[in-house]
Image: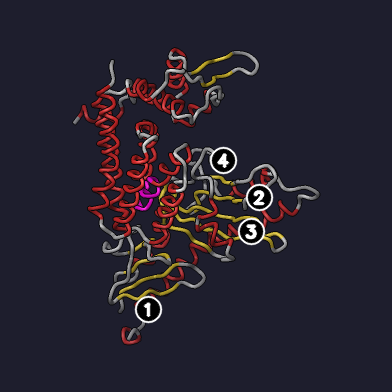
């Protein structure tokens, strides 16, 4: 009991936070959300946006500088700039994750996505379905590029919001930031099949929600996450260290 | 039938309806002030198209409605959302401020760039389309507001016009839990299951565990929905 109480007030693990910031920025650079040569916001601003201390941010930036992904210039017109290493690809990103971490992230994400879909099926009214249908339509017309990825993210936030749970929605948004870019990079954009699979799964989830089939909606939403994570884990296992 | 019961159940239902109207009116009164101030700001710009900075004149009014010292405050965020194309320097713009329990209100800075955000287009939200279609009182939600508050919220809005032309909406966010707290005492006076829903049937507040806040009321035998004048809400109560 006493030790449990102590744990409440223990400092938040700062190495984990540094690690999280490094990953967030690395993934964003790999995915092109941050462009080669782009200037990052000031340290104070960036730390504020990411919700970490400036000390944590500085440590993360230092690590990124060592990996050649961020360049800091001093003086007038100075600041931190994004550098896109030529060898950056899914493989080098994936090396930063152990299989166990990927599995655990997938477990967490599937639990959130599944619970949200089940509640959405119980509670959604026409005004909750309208944005989902609109996102499906827009995705069908989008090319396989940044726009489709952004719409995919919005679609899953809209499902979470249809659950009427602010906490599940916040968690969906956080998980998208943590694992979204990785999951997206693992999709094979050259495969028309992959795109069709993605759309078919989305459509099936919306149909289950619309029909009020909670168990089915949960099953489909969990599968949607776990299929992608399984694929990611296979890719990770094939990597040479 | 209700007369046989000495009118009491009907009286408490009416009292609850009145209470809901009062609570919503408190917010709408503030929104009409924001509307007047916004229209004045835009009208005072002469010889050029307004820019985002022209709307900074609204800030003292918006801040005063988010003062952390307020008692029983309902409003968590308030501002003006410009119709796309109104401003010369920003195709999409919100002059939007949120309460900050530890100090001065903070401005919401959302990524409203279509090339980097899938969430920039606010023109499909009910709090925008309602006033655009001419509704004087729009209440959007309860819904999870992932755009502004990150909370389960209601957004109340009114149209803003200049010389008859629609230029945007004045809106305010109210956390559902605060609205619920404001109307709950009146609901509890009703000696039968009763709930407040929006026009679609989403439950805003109730005195029964059968339908809790956030659940969907899809009609039930033995229950009557009493519309609430001028508001897209209904008070549903078990028949006396």
| For marks 2 and 4 on the same chain, the one whose residue lies earlier in the sequence | 2
Q: Are marks 2 and 1 on the same chain?
A: yes
Q: Are marks 2 and 1 in contact (CB under 8 Å)?
A: no
**Mark pair 3, 1: CA separation:** 37 Å
Does B236 sit above or below residue A199?
below
Q: Badge 4 is on which residue?
A: B113
Question: Is label 4 or label 1 in front?
Answer: 4
Task: Work out whether residue A229 or residue B233 is closer to the camera in this orientation and state it.
Answer: A229
Q: Is residue A33 above or below residue B125?
A: above
| Residues at marks 2 and 4 touching, judged by CB atoms closer than 8 Å | no
Q: Which residue is mark 2?
A: B85
- Name the foreground residue: A141 vs A192: A192
Instruction: Please tell me how crowded label 1 is: few (under 14), some (14-19), or many (20+) other residues with Cα within 10 Å.
Output: some
Q: Are callouts 2 and 3 both on one chain?
A: yes
Q: Residue at x 31, y 48 (%)?
A: A116
Q: Find residue B160 and name its label.
A: 3
Q: Earlier in the sequence, mark 2 or mark 1?
A: 1
Do callouts 4 and 1 mark residues in contact (Cβ within 8 Å)? no
CA gap, disc 2 to disc 1? Answer: 49 Å
Q: Quadrant of the N terminus of chain B?
A: bottom left
Structure colour scheme: secondary structure
Q: Are marks 3 and 4 in contact (CB under 8 Å)?
A: no
- Which circle, 2 or 1, is nearer the viewer? 2
In three-dimensional space, the C-alpha distance between marks 2 and 3, rounded to whole angstroms, equals: 15 Å
Using the rendered image of the protein, determine whether residue A171 is visible from the camera's viewpoint: no
Q: Chain of mark 2?
A: B
- Residue extent of the magenta highlight: A156-167
Q: Which mark is residue B10?
A: 1
Q: Is residue B96 visible?
A: yes
């Amino acid at each position: 009991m006493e030790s449990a109480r102590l744990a409440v007030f223990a400092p938040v693990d700062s190495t984990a936070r540094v690690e999280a910031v490094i990953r967030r920025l690395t993934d964003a650079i790999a995915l092109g959300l941050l462009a080669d040569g782009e200037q990052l916001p000031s340290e104070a601003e960036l730390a504020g946006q990411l919700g970490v201390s400036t000390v944590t941010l500085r440590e993360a930036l230092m690590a990124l500088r060592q990996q050649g992904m961020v360049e800091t210039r001093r003086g007038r017109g100075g600041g931190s700039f994004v550098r896109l290493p030529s060898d950056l690809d899914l493989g080098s990103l994936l090396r930063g994750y152990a299989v166990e971490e990927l599995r655990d992230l997938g477990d967490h994400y599937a639990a959130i996505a599944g619970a949200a879909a089940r509640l959405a099926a119980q509670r959604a009214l026409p005004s909750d379905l309208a944005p989902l249908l609109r996102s499906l339509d827009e995705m069908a017309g989008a090319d396989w590029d940044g726009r489709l990825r952004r719409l995919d993210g919005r679609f899953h936030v809209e499902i979470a919001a249809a659950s009427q749970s602010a906490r599940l929605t916040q968690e969906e948004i956080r998980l998208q930031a943590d694992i979204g870019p990785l999951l997206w990079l693992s999709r094979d954009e050259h495969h028309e099949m992959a795109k069709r699979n993605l759309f078919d799964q989305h459509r099936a989830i919306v149909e289950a929600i619309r029909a009020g089939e909670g168990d089915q909606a949960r099953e489909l939403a969990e599968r949607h996450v776990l299929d992608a994570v399984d694929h990611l884990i296979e890719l990770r296992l094939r990597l040479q260290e | 039938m209700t007369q046989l019961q000495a009118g009491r159940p009907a009286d408490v239902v009416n009292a609850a309806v009145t209470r809901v109207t009062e609570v919503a009116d408190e917010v709408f009164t503030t929104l009409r002030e924001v509307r007047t101030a916004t229209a004045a700001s835009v009208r005072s710009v002469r010889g050029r198209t307004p820019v985002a900075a022209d709307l900074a004149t609204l800030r003292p009014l918006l801040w005063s409605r988010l003062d952390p010292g307020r008692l029983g405050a309902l409003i968590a965020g308030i501002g003006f959302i410009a119709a796309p194309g109104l401003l010369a320097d920003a195709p999409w713009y919100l002059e939007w401020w949120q309460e900050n329990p530890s100090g001065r209100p903070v401005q919401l800075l959302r990524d409203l760039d279509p090339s980097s955000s899938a969430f920039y287009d606010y023109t499909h939200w009910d709090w925008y389309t309602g006033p655009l279609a001419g509704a004087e009182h729009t209440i959007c939600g309860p819904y999870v507001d992932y755009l502004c508050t990150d909370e389960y919220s209601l957004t109340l809005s009114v149209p803003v016009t200049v010389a008859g032309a629609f230029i945007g909406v004045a809106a305010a966010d109210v956390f559902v839990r605060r609205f619920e707290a404001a109307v709950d005492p009146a609901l509890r006076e009703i000696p039968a299951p009763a709930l407040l829903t929006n026009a679609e049937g989403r439950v805003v507040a109730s005195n029964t565990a059968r339908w809790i806040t956030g659940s969907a009321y899809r009609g039930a035998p033995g229950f009557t929905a009493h519309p609430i004048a001028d508001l897209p809400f209904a008070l549903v109560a078990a028949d006396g």
